Amino acid sequence: MKLSEHLSKELLAQYGVTVPVGRLATTPEEAEARCREIPATKYVVKAQIGAGGRGLVGGIKMAATPSAVRSEAARLIGEALVTAQTGPAGELVNSVYIEEAVDIHRSFYLAIAFDQHTGEPVLLCSDRGGVEFEQAARIDPGIVRQFTLTFDGSDDMAALRRFLAETGVSDNALEPAAELAMAAARAFFANDATLVEINPLAVRVDGAVLAVDAKISLDTNALFRHPEFEALDDGQDVPEQERIARENDINFVKLAGNIGVVVNGAGLGLATNDMLFDAGGDPANFMDIRTTTTSLQMARGATMLLQDPSVTVVLVNVHGGGMTACDTVAEGFAIAYARAERKPPVVVRLAGQNADWARTMLKDRRLPIEDFSDMSSAIARAVQVAKGGRR
């Protein structure tokens, strides 16, 4: 789940990150009124959308007076901004955020995320912060430096200061920048975030630092630990397939391959995908059918998968046990397959609780399955079919 700029800043401020004074407005009249509450001589009017790149397409404007703030807000609210991240339809602007304008001496990029190779939390920093950072980083990834963080907060502050100094943070800004980075890290860990991004991190002439723009992404699967965010989760930034899966107690992530995977359990799902890759295949999804998923919920999730035109074969790899039995998954898949317009070939491997009954159920309902007793054989056959080797 992605938090908008004003919510991201509000959250970061709770952990000690300095942010400019700002107010949210949903109408031009409100924008003019709210900017008068800000002790500033110049203002910035920012369109509140989830996509990045708004500054390059007119989504951020300076305004010298409250009446100018109103004019800029009127121009933005109700319009669709098209950026490199929105697609051709753009994203509708429903609100604007008005801030005090900041005199920036130097701009940095700072983010906290997980390293995709090691799984470790890392602090990313570059001295090329600003609206053109993403383009610059694509051209030269070497402009971004990386510092590994600890999960428990016992980071070596001296090492962190050296890292920031090597990135280009000057002496008088070094301590404030290190403190801000650690405050952002506390926010990252405390709220189960997957990304905390500050761009630009502004450094004033006197060495003061503050987050001029910020973006936070939260782990949707961890929202049960954070009921305070439930009201913010409107599902707008979730892909349609993942939204359907979430509503039906299924964890689902769309991937780029053509082998649809129906699996009960995250561990089995990861192992199945790894084995598919090792066998030369390419999974179309990661799926984790939760222990609370009913057969009807399973049917909705499977229907969504069968409708995907990229799926050329489906692998059902189920090991029944605990609260999820094989027949629950098989019944849901059988319902979905019977109703589906697209009926790709199905490779099945069933083991554990009620496996024989589940296998009988699928055959009795005349699903054109190929049944295998072990994972390796089922995976090899699914890969063969996916590559056009269906007999």
Image (cartoon, helix red, strand yellow):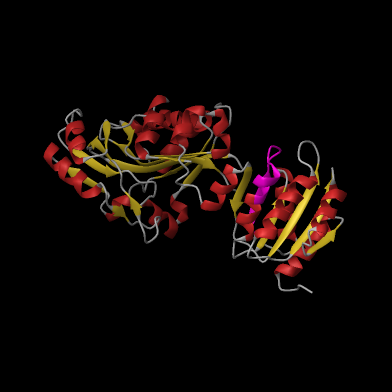
Relative image position of residue 142 (x, y in whole percent):
47, 53
Q: Is residue 195 left or right of residue 133?
A: right
Residue at point 80%, 60% (across, down): 378
Q: Is residue 101 left or right of residue 325?
A: left
Q: Please name the residue shown 85% across and 45% down the image.
A: 354
Residue range in magenta is 283-299
Query: Is residue 319 something that shows in the picture?
Result: yes
Q: Is residue 370 above or below residue 65?
A: below
Q: What percent of the width, then of the height, locates residue 17?
A: 38, 29
Horizontal side of residue 221 vs 25, given as left or right: right
Q: Position of residue 231 (x, y in %)?
A: 45, 32
> Does 125 appear above or below 339?
above
Is residue 260 visible in the rendered image? The answer is: no
Task: Examine the structure image and report whether residue 301 is included in the region drawn in magenta.
Answer: no
Quarter-of-image position of residue 255: bottom right
- Along the viewing direction, whichever of 243 and 379 lies nearer the viewer: 243
Residue 223: percent from left, percent from top: 54, 33
Residue 253 lies left or right of residue 38; in this view the side is right
- Queried whether the magenta region covers residue 295, the answer comes back as yes
Q: Which residue is located at x 56 percent, y 52 percent?
A: 241
Q: Relative to the observer, which residue lies in front, 380 or 126?
A: 380
- Check the picture and name the quadrant holding the C terminus: bottom right
